[in-house]
Image: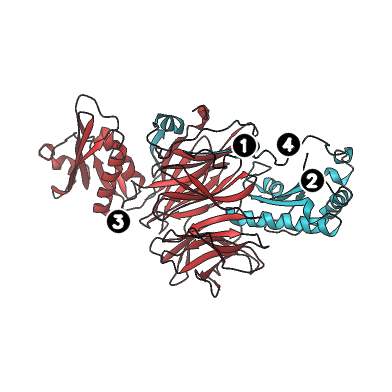
Chain colours: A red, B cyan
């Protein structure tokens, strides 16, 4: 694999740029390690990072802990009450014959009671995944919301060497670890979209100079070219049942929205305006498709039944509303919004049609909801670096994932 | 209370992680890349060979045909043919007055050289959404194509491709860079 030069290794920084006022104090005590072979992953460190990154919790530094208990009997709750901890997590990782047993317990410090306790087996390779799973369990217990720490994201990076750019479509864990390149090209790659079952990615590649849409199966790397018409082949969006792709094609003139049946390869033209129609996104119930059109002079969002029918304008606030993305429950859409000047991520309530601007710009794009609907991942640019950010749907929490050595964009959270 | 705090600083290496995966685990592993000199190079992970999607075989693109290069008029700064980039206003695909004589000169040249082909590459600046910018870049290229066709070029001589904001000419993130990036490049085959 001489493919990569040293600069393709990504240095990832995750910062909480804005947290909630009511962040709960939580201690994750370093887990006790037992066994001859050692433990390749600091499980409690990963859990601590996950919970801290969520913005919901204020994590206690290890050096400020009054002790390092690994069993319930060893905890002196008064010590932890004295330093204002609400919750604490303890655990043990035991190695035996190359296999790992991980156990953890979550306690309410004031009541001195156990809220959660699990024991799970893991291979060495799966220890990070196990840690993310623990984070999900703790997060759900303490917030009532499903955790997204064990999920995956995809995104596109560009690195430059002299005049040549290399574009990579990558898939990584939600914390940026285990990044793997699934396609690379010296011509642009764009618009990755996860299939509803999380097994495939549709994306646009310019590797043949003209744009074409591909579907790639992650497990095998096999891919199919599903659209290669004259002109634009772009903006793939999966139907919720995975049987169709909504796409943008300009083969007949102006860009229009089409629905491509993946089994029969039949194509149905959904919009017929002379303006730009692009960026289709399927509603989670499968009934409608929201898209961007400049038929009114400026880009705004419109909605059309996915079987075809009347096209209605959705957005009237601001001079630019584009690249819609549905929340998993279909109640909200995220979009790129501008009222002149900066481009920001906004969220619209589909019932009331009111728009709430969540980010500060100046150049935010490509919003994608986390599977639990509580966070929106998006791409930002500031000072010449492209990075990924996440914002809670109420705008109160923000986090930033910075990749130092290459530009990163178009994040998509796996379902 | 707002708090600014670096929670964790971690280094990862995609190279090491992928290099470590063994052959049995095809999941998300890397394919190898063809020689970097290919015009249309692309590779995918675990792609079954021969599917016709490894792009380096597609060398018949534009820009490698060195024979019969363009005449001296293209390098004479006083000749409008030396201008091969048409710039546009924000969110507009309307050709500005300044560039009408430039396009006319190219149309005339193409009319007189019917074997010559050009690719009109449409581009946009980085603001706004990426796929919308692809559409905008195509509209810009079509505006130029229509003017070329109305003044002597034939449809068969013209090909349009839009790269949107994916191939900026200027790397900056301010209006001076944005101006240079909202453009159509008239790329002659053999250039």
Pointers 1 and 2 in contact (CB under 8 A)?
no
Q: Earlier in the sequence, mark 1 or mark 2?
A: 1
Work out whether disc 3 and disc 2 sit on a shared chain: no
**How many angstroms separate mark 4 from mark 1 (CA)?**
13 Å
User: Measuring 43% from the left and 44% from the top, which residue is drawn there?
Assistant: A218
**How many angstroms separate mark 2 from mark 4 (CA)?**
18 Å
| Viewer-nearest residue: A295 or B65 | B65
Q: Is residue B15 left or right of residue A104?
A: right
Q: Chain of mark 2?
A: B
**Label 4: which secondary element:** loop
Residue that mark 4 sits on? B64
Q: In the rendered image, is residue B82 in sight?
A: yes
**How many angstroms separate mark 3 from mark 1 (CA)?**
48 Å
Work out whether disc 1 and disc 2 sit on a shared chain: yes
Residue A145 tag number: 3
Residue A124's spot in the image, x, y percent? 28, 33
Residue A72's spot in the image, x, y percent? 12, 40
In front: mark 3 or mark 4? 4
**Label 2: which secondary element:** loop
Work out whether disc 2 and disc 4 sit on a shared chain: yes
In front: mark 3 or mark 2? 2
User: Measuring 45% from the left and 60% from the top, which residue is drawn there?
Assistant: A243
Residue that mark 1 sits on? B56
**How many angstroms separate mark 3 from mark 2 (CA)?**
56 Å
């Amino acid at each position: 694999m001489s493919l990569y030069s040293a600069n393709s290794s990504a240095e990832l920084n995750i910062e909480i740029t804005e947290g909630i006022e009511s962040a709960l104090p939580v201690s994750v005590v370093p887990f006790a390690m037992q066994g001859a072979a050692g433990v390749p992953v600091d499980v409690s460190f990963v859990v601590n990072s996950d919970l801290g990154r969520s913005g919901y919790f204020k994590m206690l530094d290890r050096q400020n802990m009054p002790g390092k208990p690994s069993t319930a009997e060893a905890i002196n709750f008064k010590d932890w009450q004295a330093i204002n901890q609400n919750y604490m997590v303890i655990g043990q990782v035991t190695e035996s014959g190359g296999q790992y047993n991980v156990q953890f317990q979550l306690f309410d410090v004031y009541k001195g009671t156990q809220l959660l306790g699990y024991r799970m087996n893991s291979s060495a390779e799966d220890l990070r995944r196990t840690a993310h799973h623990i984070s999900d369990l703790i997060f759900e217990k303490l917030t009532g919301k499903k955790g997204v720490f064990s999920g995956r994201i995809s995104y596109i990076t560009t690195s430059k060497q002299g005049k040549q750019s290399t574009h990579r479509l990558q898939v990584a864990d939600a914390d940026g670890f285990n990044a793997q390149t699934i396609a690379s090209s010296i011509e642009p790659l764009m618009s990755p979209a996860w299939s509803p079952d999380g097994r495939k990615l549709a994306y646009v590649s310019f590797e043949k100079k003209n744009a074409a849409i591909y579907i790639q199966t992650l497990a095998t790397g096999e891919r199919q070219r599903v659209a290669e018409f004259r002109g634009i082949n772009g903006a793939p969006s999966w139907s919720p049942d995975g049987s169709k792709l909504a796409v943008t094609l300009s083969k007949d003139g102006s860009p229009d929205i089409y629905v491509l049946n993946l089994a029969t390869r039949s194509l149905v033209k959904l919009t017929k305006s002379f303006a730009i129609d692009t960026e289709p996104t399927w509603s989670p119930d499968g009934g409608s498709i929201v898209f961007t059109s400049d038929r009114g002079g400026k880009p705004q969002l419109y909605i059309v039944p996915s079987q075809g029918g009347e096209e209605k304008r959705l957005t009237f606030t601001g001079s630019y509303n584009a690249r819609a993305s549905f929340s998993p429950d279909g109640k909200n859409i995220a979009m790129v919004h501008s009222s002149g000047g900066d481009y920001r991520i906004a969220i619209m309530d589909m019932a009331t049609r009111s728009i709430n601007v969540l980010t500060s710009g100046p150049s935010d794009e490509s919003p994608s909801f986390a599977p639990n609907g509580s966070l929106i991942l998006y791409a930002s640019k500031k000072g010449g670096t492209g990075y990924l950010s996440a914002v809670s749907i109420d705008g109160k929490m923000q986090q930033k994932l910075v990749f130092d050595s290459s530009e990163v964009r178009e994040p998509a959270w796996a379902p | 209370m707002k708090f600014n705090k670096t929670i964790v600083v971690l280094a990862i290496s995609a190279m090491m992680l992928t290099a470590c995966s063994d052959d049995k685990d095809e999941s998300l592993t890397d394919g190898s890349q063809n020689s970097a000199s290919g015009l249309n190079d692309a590779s995918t992970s675990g792609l079954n060979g021969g599917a016709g999607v490894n792009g380096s075989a597609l060398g018949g693109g534009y820009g490698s045909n060195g024979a019969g290069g363009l005449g001296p008029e293209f390098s004479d700064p006083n000749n409008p043919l030396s201008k091969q980039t048409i710039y546009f206003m924000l969110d507009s695909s309307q050709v500005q007055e300044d560039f009408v004589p430039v396009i006319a000169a190219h149309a005339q040249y193409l009319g007189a050289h019917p074997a010559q082909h050009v690719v009109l590459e449409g581009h946009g600046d980085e603001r706004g959404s990426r796929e919308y910018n692809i559409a905008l870049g195509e509209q810009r290229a079509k505006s130029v194509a229509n003017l070329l066709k109305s003044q002597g070029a034939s449809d068969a001589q013209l090909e349009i491709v839009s790269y949107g904001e994916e191939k900026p000419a200027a790397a900056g993130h301010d209006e001076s860079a944005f101006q240079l990036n909202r453009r159509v490049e008239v790329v002659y085959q053999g250039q």
